[in-house]
Image (spheres, rainbow, N blue to C red):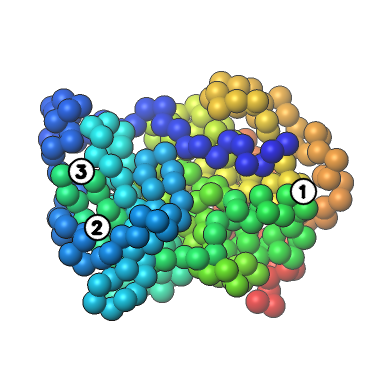
C-alpha cells in the first residue's frame, strides 16, 4: 500500500461563518478582512518573501522562506490567497485564532507551546492574501520521513519516542481547550534535519481545521483526513478523543508501514465500513513481528468506543512507552 495516499484534508461541512461574513456574497469575501487585528498589511515592508524557495504546498496555500529585512533571520511564510471561498476564509481565521490562543495564553509563550507547536511570528493581510509568518523548520515532515524509509518500518525504540512527543503535544493542546482534528504525518514537522532521532524536535503544524472545545461537549462538523478519522468523527458526534485515534493510526503506520483500515477512497461511508468490518492487524503480515506491548497500545488507541479509548496520560504511562523512553 502506498503510504503517501490519503493525505488530503477534507471538509464535509464547516461551522457556520460569523454573521458579519455570512451576509456577504462569495465575491465580496475577496474584499472583506479575514483576520482580526493583523500584525500589518504589507508583509514586504518587514520581510523578503523568496518565491523561489518553496517549502511546501497545501490545499489552501503555499509556504515559502521569508527573510526579516532588519535582522536577516529566516522564517516560513504561509500565503493563502483570498479567492472568495467561505471555507478558505474560515480556515485562515481559525488557524490564526488557535495559534494566537496557544502562543498568547501565557506571556511570554509557555515552553510547552513553543516546544510542540510551530509558533507564529505575525500575520499580514492585504487585498489579495493572508500571510502567516512562522518559525522556520528545516527537517521536513514525518510524512517525508515515512516516504523516504518506505518499505522499511520504524523500530519500536524510534516509534515510541515519536509517539511520545506527538501524545505530549496533543495533551498540551487538549489542556488548552483545542482539538486538532487533523493529526497526521504531514502535519508533524521536524525542527531541523539533524533532529529526526530527537523526538522533542517534532512539532505540530496546520491548525486550520482545529476546534476550540469544552469538556463533555460533542461536535458535529466533519473535518480532517479520512484515513486518520476516528469513527465518531465520521459520524459527526465527537470530542477530543479523535486526536488519540489519529495518533493510533500513526503508530500502526510507523510499525507496520500500511494503514489498518483501507477504504480504497476518501469516501466517509467507505471509511466507516472499513473500520467496522476490519480487525486490527488481520490484513498485515507484519503484525506478528511487533511486541505484545505495542499491539496492546495500538488496540487501546484504536478502540471504536471513545469513552473506552486510552487517554493521553494513560499512553504516557503505558509499559511500551515507558520501556523505550524512560531513559530520555
3D distance between C-alphas at marks 1 and 3: 42 Å
Quarter of the N terminus within the rendering: top right
Numbered tag placed on residue 59 in the rendering: none
- Between label 1 and label 3, give the one nearer the viewer: 3
Instruction: Answer with left or right where residue 225 lies relative to residue 22.
Output: right
The local crowd at label 3, few if under 14, some if 14 to 19, many if 20 or more residues have their Cα within 10 Å, is some
CB atoms of marks 2 and 1 within 8 Å: no
Asked whether 73 or 257 is in front, the reply is: 73
Q: Residue at x 47, y 65 (%)?
A: 137
Instruction: Answer with left or right where residue 145 lies relative to residue 219.
Output: right
Picture quadrant of residue 291? bottom right
Give percent across and percent down for residue 219.
39, 35
Give percent across and percent down for residue 129.
24, 46
First in residue order: circle 2 vs circle 1: 2
Instruction: Answer with left or right where residue 143 lies relative to residue 205.
Output: right
Name the residue beneath numbered marker 2. 123
Name the residue beneath numbered marker 1. 151
First in residue order: circle 2 vs circle 3: 2
Quarter of the C terminus within the rendering: bottom right
Name the residue beneath numbered marker 3. 128
Disc 1, SS:
loop
Disc 2, SS:
strand
3D distance between C-alphas at marks 2 and 1: 39 Å
Asked whether 165 or 143 is in front, the reply is: 143
Amino acid at each position: 500500500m502506498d503510504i503517501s495516499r490519503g493525505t488530503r484534508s477534507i471538509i464535509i461541512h464547516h461551522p457556520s461563518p460569523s454573521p458579519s461574513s455570512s451576509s456577504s456574497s462569495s465575491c465580496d469575501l475577496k474584499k472583506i478582512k479575514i483576520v482580526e487585528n493583523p500584525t500589518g498589511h504589507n508583509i514586504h515592508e518587514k520581510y523578503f518573501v523568496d518565491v523561489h524557495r518553496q517549502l511546501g504546498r497545501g490545499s489552501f496555500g503555499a509556504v515559502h522562506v521569508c527573510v526579516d529585512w532588519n535582522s536577516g533571520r529566516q522564517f516560513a511564510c504561509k500565503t493563502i490567497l483570498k479567492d472568495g471561498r467561505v471555507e478558505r476564509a474560515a480556515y485562515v481565521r481559525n488557524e490564526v485564532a488557535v495559534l494566537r490562543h496557544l502562543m498568547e495564553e501565557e506571556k511570554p509563550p509557555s515552553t510547552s507551546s513553543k516546544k510542540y507547536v510551530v509558533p507564529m511570528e505575525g500575520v499580514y493581510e492585504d487585498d489579495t492574501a493572508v500571510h502567516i509568518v512562522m518559525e522556520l523548520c528545516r527537517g521536513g515532515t514525518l510524512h517525508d520521513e515515512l516516504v523516504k524509509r518506505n518499505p522499511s518500518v520504524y523500530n519500536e525504540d524510534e516509534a515510541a519516542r515519536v509517539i511520545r512527543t506527538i501524545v505530549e503535544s496533543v495533551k498540551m493542546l487538549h489542556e488548552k481547550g483545542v482539538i486538532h482534528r487533523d493529526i497526521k504525518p504531514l502535519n508533524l514537522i521536524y525542527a531541523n534535519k539533524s533532529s529526526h532521532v530527537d523526538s522533542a524536535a517534532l512539532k505540530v503544524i496546520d491548525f486550520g481545521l482545529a476546534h476550540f472545545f469544552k469538556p463533555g461537549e460533542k461536535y458535529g462538523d466533519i473535518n480532517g483526513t479520512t484515513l486518520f478519522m476516528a469513527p465518531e468523527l465520521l459520524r459527526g458526534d465527537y470530542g477530543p478523543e479523535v486526536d488519540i485515534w489519529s495518533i493510533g493510526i500513526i503508530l500502526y503506520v510507523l510499525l507496520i508501514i500500511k494503514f489498518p483500515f483501507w477504504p480504497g477512497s476518501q469516501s466517509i461511508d467507505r471509511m466507516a465500513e472499513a473500520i467496522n468490518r476490519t480487525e486490527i492487524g488481520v490484513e498485515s503480515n507484519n503484525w506478528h513481528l511487533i511486541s505484545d506491548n505495542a499491539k496492546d497500545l495500538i488496540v487501546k488507541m484504536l478502540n471504536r468506543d471513545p469513552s473506552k479509548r486510552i487517554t493521553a496520560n494513560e499512553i504516557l504511562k503505558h509499559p511500551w512507552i515507558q520501556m523505550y523512553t524512560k531513559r530520555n
